Image: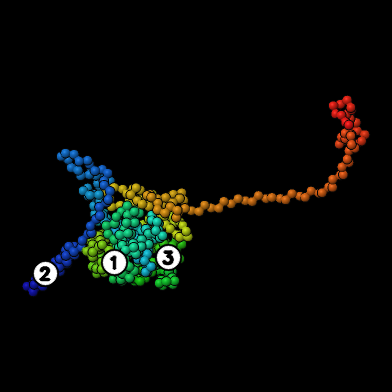
Amino acid sequence: MDKKGKMIRLICALVAGTAALTMGAMSLYMLWEKPPEQKQAAKPLTDMVQPSPGKSTRPSPSPAQDRGTAFETERQDGIYTILLVGNDDGTGNTDTIMLAKLDTVRHTADFVSIPRDTLINTDSPVRKINNVYWGGRNMGGDGISTLSAHIKKLSGIDPDCYAVLDLDVFQQAVDELGGIWFDVPERMYYEQGPVIDLQPGYQLLNGEQCMWLCRYRSTYVNGDIDRISVQHDFLKAAAEQFLSLGSIPNISKIAALLAENMDTNMTAANMAYFARQLLMCDSEDINFHTAPNTPAMFHDLSYTFLDLYDWLELINQVLNPYAEPITEAQLDLVYLHNGNVCCTGALKGMSYFSRPEPESHVEEEYYEEPAEEEYVEPEEEVPAEEGYWIWPELMEDPEADLNMPTDEDWLSFE
């Protein structure tokens, strides 16, 4: 019995030690991970209580603000906004742009894609949102500040965090995760540039194949809009896989990889914090959206105009981190109204958007040449004898009684 008792005590000690080490490691991890700072809104609350003697100046919350609102600030409590950007294969354009909101109180996450051809209010030669990042860098800036400024103009939101991900880092991160299972919707093949070669069907995709999937748009009817839809399906599938596991493989290693190789203001501890918060979400609470838009052509270039009021509704439903709704007055956005280009602010370069008037088409009236009349040679005139009054009728009928004038009449003849 003593021998068995010692064995049991030893096993219990080992289990307790292992549990203690695990809890210690988790505690250290929890201490290591850290949420990023939140940016405050630039506008004041409209319901601030006016200062009065002996009374607090804390704003009175409305019913809409009462849930999850930190009343001392203009932010809803526990909400973070993140600008996620994907660089393409070296041309400098950021063809993937997403604005995300992570709610760490309700454990929800929403990601909204902004199409690459979205028109921005600028008078520069290139007016697409996907050119802003590298355009800012080429002008001596840091790129992301310029892009973030335009995102704020489009959405009214100043993102708390940003991350610009290059394709090679994306591939490495996926490989560290062990790949992603995904149902490729169709045959994807492209050889006019970096080769893309994917067979349709459910399969485990490595980092390079996932990059192919997210970049492909060659045979899509709606081009970039259809590509965004496939990207959303891919990200949704990845989220569901890791939520079902209850963990993200090599999370600390991936966080370090991304922090060291991305243009970002997040630390590895910030990324680890976000990863753990995502794991606390249910799969149905992680959703992907596309900004409502209308395509149009100007000067043989394709543009995407955001649909102002549908876009505002989506912003306030799934993205707005502030205590008050975002309004039209806070945006600097170019949109179409009844086919005309409008802007919530002062439109830059109005002449660029002046559509040429269609040429008026007037049907030519049918004109028929008149028929030639038959030529009739005129009769020879018979000269009248001098001193006589000749009536025309008399020339036709000499016997006619025409009551010829006499000398007594007022007419006289020599």
* CA distance separating discs 3 and 2: 59 Å
Disc 1 or 2, which lies upstream in sequence? 2
273 or 360: nearer the viewer? 360
Query: How far across and down, in percent of the image, does residue 94 sit?
Result: 36, 63
Query: How far across and down, in percent of the image, does residue 7 sit?
Result: 10, 73
Query: How far across and down, in percent of the image, does residue 131 sit?
Result: 37, 62
Amino acid identity at mark 3: Arg
Query: How far across and down, in percent of the image, does residue 255 sit?
Result: 25, 67
Disc 3 or 1, which lies upstream in sequence? 3
Residue at the farthest top position: 408
Amino acid identity at mark 1: Met
Q: Tell me if residue 399 comes above or below residue 270 in the rendering.
A: above
182 or 216: nearer the viewer? 216
Q: Tell me if residue 216 comes above or below residue 409 in the rendering.
A: below
Secondary structure under the numbered disc 2 in the rendered image: helix
* CA distance separating discs 3 and 1: 25 Å
Tag shown at residue 173: none
* Residue pictured at 47% horizontal, 60% vertical: 300
* Side of 329 relative to 45 (left or right): right
Tag shown at residue 262: 1
Mark nearer the viewer, 3 or 2: 3
Tag shown at residue 13: 2
